[in-house]
Image (cartoon, coloured by chain):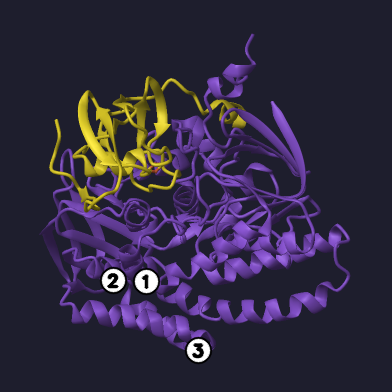
Chain colours: A yellow, B purple
Amino acid sequence: MATEPYFVIPAKPGSSTVTITFEGRKIVVPAGISVAAALLAGGVGVFRTSIVSAAPRAPFCMMGVCFECLVEIDGISGRQSCMVPVTDGMAIRRQEGSSALDVSEGAKDDV
Amino acid sequence: MTSETADLVVIGAGPAGLAAACEARELGMSVVVLDEQTAPGGQIYRNIESVTDDRQDVLGPDYVAGQELAAAFRRSGAEHCGGATVWNLTTDGVVDYIADGPKTVSGKYVLLASGAMERPFPIKGWTLPGVMGAGAAQVLLKGAGAVPAGPVTMVGSGPLLYLLAWQYMRAGVRIAVVVDTTPMTNYLRAVPKLPGALAGWPDLSKGLKLLGALRKGGVKVYRDAREVAIEGRDAAQAVTFRHRGGRIELPARLVLLHQGVVPNVQLSMSTGLDHSWDAAQHCWTPVTDEWGRMATSSLYVAGDSRGISGALASAVQGRLAALSIGQQLEKLSDLQTRAAPLRRQLKRYMAIRPFLDTLYCPREIHRVPTDDDVMVCRCEEVTAGQIRGYVKLGCLGPNQTKAFGRCGMGPCQGRFCGVTVTELIAKERKVDCAEVGHYRIRPPIKPILLRDLSAPKDEEP
Ligand code: FES
C-alpha cells in the first residue's frame, strides 16, 4: 500500500535508526524524528480517513494544530503523529473514521 | 497527581517564552517552562540545539541566531518541562498538563507564549493528501531534515513561503513553480507604509534578497494568481488558478500552501478573557495592557500568540512581560528604566509590520471561500455552503454552527476553522467580525486520554 514518498530524508552516514511498522510494513527511519515525518518519508500517503465521508487525509500543519495526522500508535487511537517521536518497534495503524476519544464534551452545552 | 508552584510558569518555549524565562531568572524568580515539544526553540527555532552543520547552512542565519537564546535559557536555571500538553488553565495561574501522567503547576503569574499557526487556506482540494502548509514542510525540514522527494508546487504569499523556497533551493530541491497569490493592488497599498518600514531596513533587505535569489535561480513564478483550487480524487494531482484573465492548470503532486500566520489563541481564549478582532490582520488577538497582561488576571501573553510580531520582537515582548511580572512580585523597583531600551528595540523590530501586513494581506476569496463546496471545518467536514445555509436559518455566530452541523466540534476544536467561520458568517450577515464573535473554547483544550488522567502505573497497588 506504499506510495511514492512525498518527502525524503537524506541518509547521514553513521546516524542511528529505528524500525517502526505501518499496517505491518517495516519502515527504517532516523531516530529522533516525529512519527508523521517518518511515515511521510516512508511512503505512507493516507494517515487516516475522515469522520463523515471516509475521505483520505494526511498531515497538514505538522505542529499539533490540525489533527489531520491522527493514527493509532501501539493500540491507542487518536494520537497526533506529528507530536510523537518514533521509538524502536512502534506499531502504527491508519485511523479509520473517528477515534475512541471524544473531545467535544466541553462544547456540547455551548448552544 | 503531582503539583508544584513557581513565581512564573511559561507556556511555550519559542523566542518569547525563552527570553521571558531568562529575564525572570535574572530577577531571581523561580521559573517553570512547559512546552509541547521535547526541546526548546518553538516553531521558528525548532531543533535548534541539535541541528547539523549542513542543515544550518540550508536554514540560514536567522534560524541559527536562535542558538544563543536557547543556550542562555539552558544556563538560566529555569526548569524546562518538554513534552508537556497543557489542557487546562485558570485566570489565577493554575496550569494542568500531561507529561508522563497528569500534573499541575501553580504560577503566581503565567506567561502564555504559544506562538502562531498558519492561517487556514480554505480552497477546493485543500484536504487532499499531497497538500500541506508551507510551515508544515518547514517543520519537516527543521525537525527531520526531510525535503520533497519530487518537484514541489508552492502556492500563496508571505515571507515564510519565500524563505522556504530559498531554503529548498539551497538544499537542491526542485521547485516546479511558485504560484504567488499576493494581489497586485496590495503593492500600491503598501507603498505609503514603506517609509515607516525603513526603520526595519535589515528585515526589508533580507526579504528582497530572498526574492532576488528565486529569480536568479530560474524558478517559474506566476504573480497575482487568484481563485486557486487543487484537483484530484484521492490525492493532489493538479493545481489550477486564474492568471491574467486566463485559467491555468499545472500538474502537481505535492502542493505547499501558505498565506501568513495568525496568533494561536486557543489557550488564551479558553480562559474566557477578552479577545478582539484585528481587522488589519484578520484574526483574533487577546486584549492586554502594554505589558501583555490580560485584564487583572495572573496571565500575561507575549510573542506571536499576542499578535504576529516575528521572532525578534517576540523575544523582547517576553522580556518586557517578565519585567512587569517582576515588579508585581517586588523583584525590581526601576521598571521604567529597565524597560526603556527594550521598548526602543521593540519599536524598531515592529517597524516593518504595517508594511508586511498590508503587502501580504491575503485575498478575501482565499480566506472566505465563495465556492459552496469548499471544506471549512476539516474535522467534521462542514462546507462554506453549509455554513451560509445555517446563517440563512438564523445562525448568528460560530458557537451556533456547532448545533447546526457539528462545525468546530472535531478533534481540532475549531483551531483550524475558527477565523474562517467568523469571517464567513460576518460576510454573510453583513456585520463586523467582532459582532459575530468566536468559538467559545472550553477545557480540555487538547484531547486527552482518560488513561493519561489516571494515576501512573507505579502508583498502583
Ligand atoms: S499534522 Fe496537524 S496536528 Fe499533526
Give the label, 3 or 1, closer to the camera. Answer: 1
Please name the residue that numbered disc 2 is placed on. B166
Tell me the quadrant of the picture where the N terminus of chain B can be found.
top right
In this view of the protein, which residue sits in the foreground, B76 or B110? B76
* Rendered residue at 25%/53% (across/down): A12
The chain containing the residue under callout 1 comes to B
Instruction: Give the quadrant of ligand 1.
Output: top left
Corner quadrant of residue B385? top left
Q: Position of residue B103 (x, y in %)?
A: 66, 32
Whole-Å distance between the Cαs marked 3 and 1? 23 Å
The chain containing the residue under callout 2 comes to B
Amino acid bearing label 3: Leu
Q: Earlier in the sequence, mark 2 or mark 1?
A: 1
Give the label, 2 or 1, closer to the camera. Answer: 1
Please name the residue that numbered disc 3 is placed on. B198
The chain containing the residue under callout 3 comes to B
Whole-Å distance between the Cαs marked 3 and 2? 23 Å
B427 vs A45: above or below: below
* Rendered residue at 49%/45% (across/down): B415
Corner quadrant of residue B128? top left
Count of picture labels:
3
Seen as rendered, the residue at the extreme front is A14
